[in-house]
Amino acid sequence: MNAIKLPFKFDVELIKKELSQFSKEDYRDIYNASVTLKTLWLIHLIEPINDADGLPVFLPNAALKKCPYLLSVFETFNCPVETFRIHVLDPGASIQPHRDNGYRFKDGMVRLHIPIKTSKNVELIIDKERVFMQPGECWYCDFHKVHEVHNYSEEPRIHLILDCKVNEWLTGIFNKVID
């Protein structure tokens, strides 16, 4: 299976309102060989802090602390979250076919997407299969498989992306959806 819709629904209007406090200068260009420069932008909302054993724990940064609703979204996930970021793919931009190794359930790390702004003219293709996501939904996709994204719309595609370590809580969520 290429994608699974998880049983969460988030208020994208509240997220958009909170994101409106950030300007283009608050986002960084993502360097990725699969993407044309200056077409894919991100803002990180958590940062690593070492725990008593010297291991990183990812906690809200200053940007997330200014966004109470997004903070509640972060706190919804009762598992270790190592990435909690906003991705913006500009109109007309594409992410070329590639793999994100290690981001699948059986590897113990999953990448989740929560679309904030999208359209029918945005194509996410995983293993030659198009996946349709609606704003506010939460999706697990097997990005270990070859995938690509094309924003054929005239608006930016905005997603909240989480990388989560699989634990008992997340396994229970997946088991409920798959059964």
Image (cartoon, grey):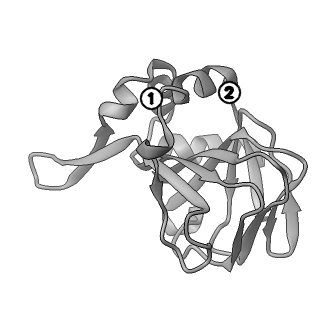
Report the residue at 57% width, 73% height from top. Answer: 100
Q: Secondary structure at mark 1?
A: helix
Asked if residue 139 shows in the view, the reply is yes
Q: Position of residue 129 (x, y in %)?
A: 87, 68
Q: Position of residue 103 (x, y in %)?
A: 55, 66
Q: Secondary structure at mark 2?
A: helix
Label 2: which residue? 12
Q: Amino acid at mark 2?
A: Val
Q: CA distance from mark 1 to mark 2?
A: 16 Å
Crowd tier of the residue under label 2, counting other residues whose Cα lies within 10 Å: few below 14, some 14–19, many 20 or above: some
Location of residue 131 (image quadrant):
bottom right
Question: Are circles 1 and 2 on residues that touch, CB within 8 Å?
Answer: no
Report the residue at 48% width, 26% height from top. Answer: 21
N-terminal of the pair, mark 1 or mark 2, is 2
- Residue 97, compared with residue 135, is above or below; it is below
Q: Position of residue 28 (x, y in %)?
A: 44, 55
Report the residue at 71% width, 47% height from top. Answer: 156
Label 1: which residue? 75
Q: Amino acid at mark 1?
A: Glu
Residue sticking out furthest to the right? 120
Q: Indicate the quadrant containing the N terminus: top left, top right, bottom left or bottom right.
A: bottom right
Q: Is residue 112 left or right of residue 81?
A: right
